[in-house]
């Protein structure tokens, strides 16, 4: 069973009854629906896609990934290509000059550690060790590591993107000033392992559709009744 986080928010200290993760999942599932989890079983693919998704839309990162694979059929081919060619291939994802250099370095480091590109061993390691292995790669933070583990290997690691962070803070689940990298561990500790995927996907949908960064639709929100509206 997951260990409950011990970082009380201001709302919790005031005795306000907050939504539990299980309640949030039930309500948001009903409001938005949710696609079932399907592991890609492709950790390196998820690692690259997460890098390309930084500071851009899913559509743009998807285009960049498609063009990268179309142009370079193997990860070895990406490493062997000049960085300007990689930059050109991923231009649709934005920030291509920066991301191409990071991608080259990331893949080179993975190759040096695992020459056959098989990161399946991360499925067998204790979760914290798997996270530590991934975050020891330059440029890989808690969110990227969690994306690889959750989406490629179906491990209960919680990625905290901008939507998950914003919605969680507004709901009083974590303190409003808590850094995102710390929020990963605190939120994950609140959630049962079999709820991690649902929590992640549901909060993203809620952040995109209702709890916007600017102008949240509180009057249409299915969580409004017990939302402390922190920062709104």
Image (cartoon, helix red, strand yellow):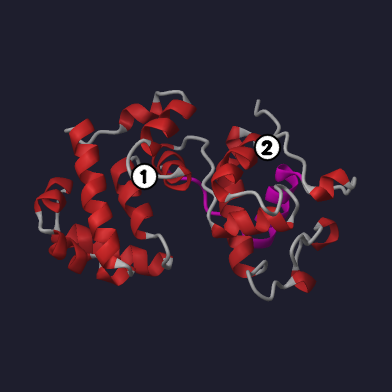
Q: Is residue 2 left or right of residue 14?
A: left
Of 152 and 86, nearer the camera is 86
**As displayed, is residue 129 above or below residue 173?**
above
Q: Earlier in the sequence, mark 2 or mark 1?
A: 1
- Residue at image point 35% right, 47% down: 139
- Residue at image point 86% right, 47% down: 17
Q: Position of residue 209 (x, y in %)?
A: 62, 69
Q: Position of residue 87 (x, y in %)?
A: 20, 65
- Residue at image point 71% right, 49% down: 175
Residue at image mark 1: 40
> What's the mark number on residue 190?
2
Of 138 and 203, nearer the camera is 138
Q: Quadrant of the C terminus?
A: bottom right
What separation in Å lies between label 2 and label 1 (alpha carbons)?
26 Å
Per the rendered image, the range of residues in magenta is: 20-38
Say which element carries label 1.
loop
Q: Is residue 75 left or right of residue 57?
A: left
Q: Residues within 10 Å of mark 1 (few under 14, many from 20)?
A: some
Whether the residues at callouts 2 and 1 have beta carbons within 8 Å, the answer is no
**As displayed, is residue 117 above or below residue 54?**
above
Of 1 and 135, nearer the camera is 135
- Residue at image point 56% right, 53% down: 201
């Amino acid at each position: 069973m997951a260990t409950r986080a011990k970082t009380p928010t201001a709302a919790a200290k005031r005795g306000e009854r907050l939504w539990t993760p299980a309640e949030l999942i039930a309500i948001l599932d009903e409001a938005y629906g949710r696609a079932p989890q399907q592991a890609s079983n492709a950790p390196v693919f998820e690692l690259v896609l997460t890098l390309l998704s930084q500071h851009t839309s899913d559509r743009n990162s998807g285009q960049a990934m498609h063009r990268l694979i179309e142009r370079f059929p193997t990860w070895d081919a990406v490493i062997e290509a000049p960085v300007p060619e990689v930059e050109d291939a991923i231009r649709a994802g934005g920030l291509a000059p920066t991301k191409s250099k990071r991608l080259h370095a990331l893949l080179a480091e993975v190759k040096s550690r695992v020459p056959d590109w098989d990161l399946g061993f991360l499925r067998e390691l204790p979760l914290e060790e798997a996270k530590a292995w991934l975050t020891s790669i330059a440029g890989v933070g808690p969110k990227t590591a969690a994306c690889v583990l959750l989406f490629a290997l179906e491990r209960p690691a919680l990625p905290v993107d901008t939507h998950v962070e914003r919605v969680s803070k507004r709901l009083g689940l974590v303190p409003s000033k808590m850094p995102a990298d710390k929020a990963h561990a605190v939120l994950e500790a609140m959630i049962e392992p079999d709820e991690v995927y649902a929590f992640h996907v549901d909060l993203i949908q809620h952040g995109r559709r209702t709890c916007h960064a600017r102008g949240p639709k509180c009057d249409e929100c299915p969580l409004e009744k017990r939302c402390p509206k922190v920062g709104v």
